[in-house]
Amino acid sequence: MTSLGPSFHRLWLAATTSNLGDGIVLVGAPLLAIQLTREPVAVAGVQAAFTLPALVFALHAGAIADRRDRRSLLLIAAVLRAVALLGAGIGAAFGLLPLPVLYLAVFAVGIGVVVFDTTTQSTIPDVVETDQLGAANGRIIGAQTVMNNFVGAPLAGVLVGAAAASVLLGPALLYVIAALLLLRLPRRTTPSPPPTTRMRDDIAEGLRVLRGHAALRSIGLLAGLLNLGNAAYFGVFVLFVVGEDAPMGLPEIAFGGLAAALAAGSVAGSFVAGRLERALGPRRVLIGGVAVASLLMLLPVITAAILPVAVFAFLLGVASLAVNVVSVTSRQRVVPRRLLGRVNAAFRLLAMGAMPVGAALGGGVASAFGLRPLFIAVVVLQLGALALLQRPIRDTALLTPQPDLGADGEATAGALHG
């Protein structure tokens, strides 16, 4: 960690702390909701409130990240989440938390997540050297995965059982700690000039950059189709694991154990992703990782034994994390700095926008044909998408910084260095 420098260390600590808060809210807020109502649509509204900002605000968050000082944006995102949850948590402590207020608090947290995560990806190139991007992204993405899924989820259950309000007040404290860590993060050394264009023109420029770069465009489309399949697969995977009539026939706690195995694989992947990219090149890691992850998803079709499925979860975490690191690192390496926030946001929107569709399709296909046919269909979809989209993904395209061309096509200052 120290080899990446003190500035990255502070950013990593702030991101880790912040993502722990996100993980607690993601699981804890629905647990609060079922204390207020047993209506399924109303409970599902909590998840919708959390994820909605990623769909409606992602592009604007990227444009703002390219217009404003990024440290300030990270601070604002942390403080926004802290204030929203502090108010809702005080209400919960006194038994005065109506469901609409919980929705609003979770929606505010969702906005903060979009701004914080987009800005963090765009800040990393400002605090580490170009040849350190793979290692830095591995640390950040690994921490995000572990805090959201491995630590935050079970901790949310403990907090709700101890005191309902703590599932909101605890994350509020974590966001405050993250803000204090960010205060010592240096400002960007080469701040962008004051914006002279309209927000929608800035957003359109970021979309054009992503569309115009064949390799990044292919990775973005591939990410969307992979997430479509993953949402369909894992949206119903609990039915494969939990319950007497499930193929695995395990209790609920075992599902948490499989999530822990997946997170452990992500931790392992976070330490090897940068080394793999340097040794094999980004194309081989990305394409090989997608192929391995997709083929691993056939294992539950073959067996429901717990040990092989646990190994499947671990290896899937390794492969998925390596692919994610290469994807993020390639954008940071290739895209001009002043456009990075917008391109990251456009990419995230493309990748995440397919997830609710995939979840709905997965439920329908599983209801009509069963779980194992769904799993096979997802693997076919993902391998087919890889075969269709892999050709433009070349090492030279993912390693060569692009010149910063203004709206008129002329080179401008601020092109990505290195």
Image (tube, rainbow, N blue to C red):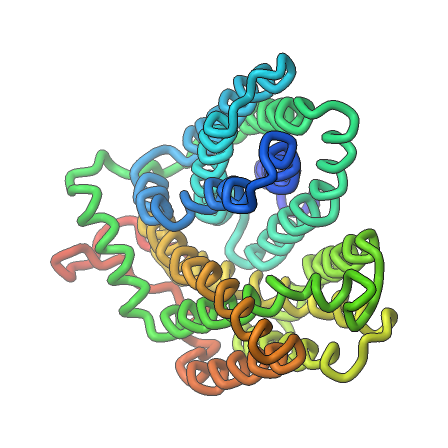
Q: How many marks?
A: 0
Q: Could one spot residue 198 in this view of the protein?
A: yes
312 to the left or right of 196: right
192 is higher (above) or lower (below) than 387: above
Residue nearest the viewer, comparing 44 with 413: 44
In this view, the residue farthest toward the left is: 408
Q: On the image, which quarter does residue 397 sit in?
A: bottom left
Q: Residue at x 36, y 41 (%)?
A: 65
Quarter that holds the C terminus: bottom left
Q: Position of residue 21 (x, y in %)?
A: 63, 34
Looking at the picture, how far across and down is residue 88, in whole percent? 54, 21
- Residue 178 or 303: which is nearer the viewer? 303
Quadrant that contains the N terminus: top right
Note whether residue 186 is visible.
no
Q: Quadrant of residue 168?
A: top right
Query: Height in image: 20 above or below 146?
Result: above
Left-right relation of 327 to 203: right
The answer to whether residue 391 is above or below residue 153 is below
Which residue is painted at 41% across and 67% down in the image? 220
Q: Nearer the viewer, residue 299 or 96?
A: 96
* Residue 22 x %, y %: 59, 38
What percent of the width, then of the height, locates residue 51?
A: 47, 46
- Residue lying furthest top: 94
Residue displayed at 65% across by 64% down:
273
